[in-house]
């Protein structure tokens, strides 16, 4: 009987395992994860302050793996991959052969230079254990310093403020969310954080991070210091390519795959945060996404292609972030846009449409309370997928329904 193995039991790996069954695969499936718990959702980790006994939100309940005949090996990583012999050796010494393999090893938090990070008062936030450590220090009057004004840092800032902690965000660039978020939206977010009492400092360089048993200190290049009970380093993520690199797979800002998610060696696929892929929708440009929906969609796509389908990557990139009662959503990729148009949608919510020189809609971003922009972003996604060139006048007119542009 065929044996399909998946390394990495996160969003992508777990979805792929179930998708194999949904597609009728009757062979053996093994899902290997180095974390000791049933695969869980990462987005809630930065949006809610977890307490000691809180369980993560599982992607799929534990018993469903047994029901579907998915063998789950947890708490043991894949140490070596022999792509000639189709064999994986685990950190506990077990050696397993496979017919097809999916690498879904995700990403790791980018470490601050010179700081090992980990269990003390200087941490990043990538997994459930990190979220518990963060939650433990969340209380009235505790001080959290966040290095990096990216999505995770700002979500944590909102969570910490809601719990009554004092929060300082230190960003090296002139503004927060410099990567991928339009300035107009970043300004709304910054203002809201400041109104909530977060001390956001931009264009500030850090010379070192230090910790003792009692406190952590951020030393600034200007000579000042920020002292905190906990420093969270949120300066981005790096694709987890160790295993693939040692096995000799081609790496290019992640494990390089083609549009069918095939790596450079036969029978081995890669998907989710760990891989870079060419995107036909954007002229075949190679990209790597760190987004929940991409991990899901690629997990399902990889499963289909492992079973012999020949389906290219086609989904429009989509990302969301929740901070306080605001939701930010982004569909598509705005690089290459020459024009930005704004549409107000009420309740302080607005959308920005990013078009290229030829008038093609490349991306749409929006922010507002709750679900205020969700529907319009969904319609924008469809316009982006259709490579539409919507009438700019209609895009900015809030009384013109985006659905009508889709029909046009
Ligand atoms: C705190 C946080 C908040 C987020 N919020 C949002 C959000 O609001 N919106 C959004 O769109 N996205 C969000 N994301 C991003 C989203 O969660 C990721 O894009 C998604 O989890 C990627 O899934 P993945 O399966 O590719 O990788 P991961 O979720 O990283 O899973 C990979 C798994 O593989 C394991 N692994 C690695 N190497 C090995 C090995 N050799 N052997 C065995 N196991 C291994 C890892 O330990 C991990 O468990 C957030 C991420 C984080 C960390």
Image: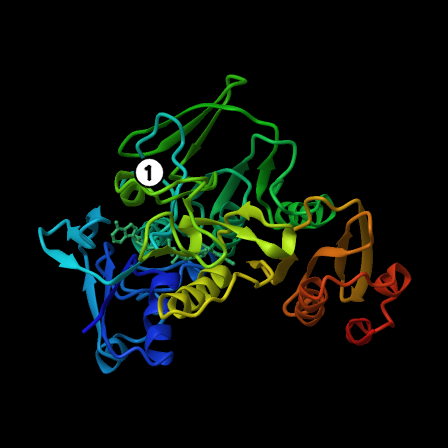
Measured as percent of width and height from the top left, residue 67 is found at 24, 82
Residue under the image location 60 percent in, 55 percent down: 280
Q: Is residue 406 above or below residue 387?
A: below
Point out residue 227 in the picture as x, y percentages from the top left corner.
Answer: 43, 31
Quadrant where the N terminus lies? bottom left
**How many dots with numbers?**
1
Rendered-image quadrant of the C terminus: bottom right
Can residue 93 be seen in this snapshot?
Answer: yes
Tell me which residue sits at (87%, 72%) in the image. Answer: 399
Find residue 92 and report its horizontal and vertical position in percent.
10, 52
103 shown above or below 30: above
Q: Is mark 1 within 8 Å of ligand 1?
A: no
Which residue bears the numbered disc 1? 121
Q: Say which element carries label 1.
A: loop
Left or right of 309, for residue 95: left
In this rendered view, identify the residue nearer to me: 48 or 76: 76
Where residue 61 sits in the image (x, y, percent)?
A: 30, 76
Q: How is the image coloured?
A: rainbow
Left or right side of 295 for 333: right
Q: Is residue 222 left or right of residue 256?
A: right
Q: Quadrant of residue 42?
A: bottom left
The answer, for residue 103, to whether it is visible in the render is no
- Image quadrant of residue 29? bottom left
Q: Which residue is outermost to the top?
A: 223
At horizontal 85% and vertical 68% (from top left) the residue drawn is 398
Dot 1: few (<14), some (14–19), or many (≥20) neighbours within 10 Å?
Answer: many
Image point (43%, 52%), residue name: 273
Please name whichever residue, 294 or 247, is drawn nearer the observer in this view of the structure: 247
Looking at the rendering, the quadrant in which ligand 1 lies is bottom left
- Residue at the far right in the pictured view: 393
Relative horizontal placement of residue 99, taking residue 94 as reference (left or right):
right
């Amino acid at each position: 009987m065929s044996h399909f193995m998946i390394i990495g039991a996160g969003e992508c790996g777990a979805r792929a395992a179930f998708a194999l069954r949904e597609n009728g695969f009757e062979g053996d499936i093994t899902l290997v994860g180095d974390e000791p718990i049933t695969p869980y959702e990462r987005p809630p980790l930065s949006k809610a302050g977890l307490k000691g006994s809180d369980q993560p939100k599982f992607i799929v309940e534990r018993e469903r793996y047994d029901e579907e005949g998915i063998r789950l090996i947890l708490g043991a990583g894949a140490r070596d991959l022999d792509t000639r012999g189709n064999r994986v050796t685990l950190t506990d010494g077990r050696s397993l052969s496979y017919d097809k393999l999916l690498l879904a090893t995700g990403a790791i938090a980018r470490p601050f230079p010179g700081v090992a990070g980990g269990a003390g008062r200087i941490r990043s936030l990538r997994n459930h254990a990190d979220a518990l450590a963060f939650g433990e220090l969340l209380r009235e009057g505790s001080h959290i310093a966040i290095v990096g004004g990216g999505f995770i840092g700002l979500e944590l800032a909102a969570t910490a403020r809601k719990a009554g902690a004092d929060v300082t965000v230190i960003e090296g660039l002139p503004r927060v969310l410099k990567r991928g978020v339009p300035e107009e939206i970043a300004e709304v977010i910054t203002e809201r954080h400041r109104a909530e009492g977060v001390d956001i400092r931009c264009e500030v360089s850090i010379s070192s991070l230090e910790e003792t048993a009692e406190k952590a200190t951020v030393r600034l290049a200007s000579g000042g210091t920020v002292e905190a009970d906990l420093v969270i380093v949120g300066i981005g993520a790096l694709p987890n390519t160790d295993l693939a690199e040692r096995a000799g797979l081609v790496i290019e800002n992640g494990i390089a795959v083609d549009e069918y998610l095939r790596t450079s060696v036969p029978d081995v696929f890669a998907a989710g945060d760990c891989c870079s892929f060419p995107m036909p929708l954007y002229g075949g440009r190679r990209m790597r996404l760190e987004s929940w929906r991409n991990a899901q969609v690629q997990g399902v796509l990889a499963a289909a292609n492992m079973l012999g389908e020949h389906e290219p990557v086609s989904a429009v990139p989509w990302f969301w972030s929740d901070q306080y009662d605001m939701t930010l959503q982004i569909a598509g990729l705005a690089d290459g846009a020459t024009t930005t148009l704004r549409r107000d949608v009420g309740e302080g919510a607005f959308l920005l449409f990013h078009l290229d020189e030829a008038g093609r809609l490349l991306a749409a971003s929006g922010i507002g309370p709750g679900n205020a922009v969700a529907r319009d972003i969904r319609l924008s996604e469809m316009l982006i997928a259709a490579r539409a060139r919507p009438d700019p006048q209609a895009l900015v007119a809030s009384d013109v329904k985006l659905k009508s542009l889709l029909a046009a």
